[in-house]
Amino acid sequence: MTILKASSITASAATAASGIRSLIVHVEPTRQASPRLQTAVDLARKLDATLIGVGVEMLQSYGDSYGMLAGEWVVELQNLLVENLKRAEATFRANTADLATEWIAVETFPAKAISRLSRSADLIVAGGAPLGGEGNYRAADTAELAIISGRPVLVAPPQGGNLVGDAVVVAWNDTRESRRALADSLPFLKRAEQVTVIEVCGKDELTDAGGRTADVARHLQRHGIRALGKAVHAPPSRVATELNIAAQAIGADLIVAGAYGHARLGEWMFGGATFDLLREPERFVLLSH
């Protein structure tokens, strides 16, 4: 297993700094959301990047038996929303005193707002909270962010943590989403000491998959990245498991993957391996769609 050395973090971050100059993160005034903010702060500090904090909520609509709420109750909900945004800003500023920052507060659905505002960011920092959360009025759904933003999304595990990135696993399945994820992850891959490109496939695909991952590894090597390709035989239900096993074997704290999703009844949902990676993430996941 690769030993992650703290001494390598500063030097390796300098390489990535040229590719990532600004990060955006949804800031919530709750303890559950604290790991996400701490991850974003740590990464912005390492990369000497600007951190854009977004306080965003939507006034949730409730209906009574007459299809409306008493005016006093609506006022109370609005006051609570305003107070939450003020608390979110205070939390953000208290944790970012030594960083270049921007603060934006808006009243709308979080995922849609962050996706639009990511036009001025290189990377969205998400996750760092239990999957599910408080619904799309107050929480930014990771699936929706990845699919509609057009930006790579770094998903922190629920406990948060500081991304080191000395070793990285790249999930490959020769699709558009995999190619996009590979390109978006180059700033991280260039600072890694070891990168393993893995395709999980059926037994009859092992030879072809090995050739595909070898091609990807050669492409990364042309960028000066230490990479190797690998094909693993396993059923589709074990893709996320095999990726985590490979990551554990080389001491990787980051998995790069294409995000696969679809719209169902107006909600974005992940399917297959992508959902499995995010259901109980054991390490950081970088997603692109």
Image: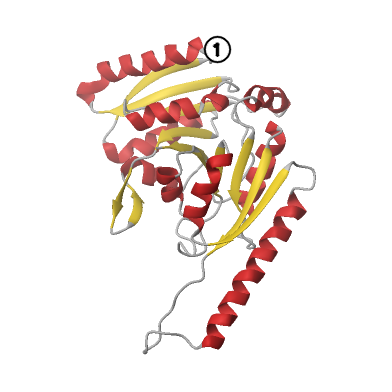
Q: Secondary structure at mark 1?
A: loop
Q: Is residue 270 left or right of residue 12?
A: left
Q: Position of residue 81 (x, y in %)?
A: 60, 70
Viewer-side residue, 119 vs 146: 119
Q: Which residue is mark 1?
A: 224
Q: Residue furthest left?
A: 204
Q: Quadrant of the N terminus?
A: top right
Q: Quadrant of the C terminus?
A: top left
Q: Position of residue 265 (x, y in %)?
A: 28, 59
Whether residue 147 is situated above or below residue 246 in the rendered picture: below
Whether residue 271 is situated above or below residue 129 in the rendered picture: above
Q: Can residue 249 be seen from the camera position used here?
A: no
Q: Position of residue 200 (x, y in %)?
A: 32, 29
Q: Position of residue 190 (x, y in %)?
A: 57, 20
Q: Is residue 92 left or right of residue 205?
A: right
- Residue at point 68%, 32% (across, down): 47
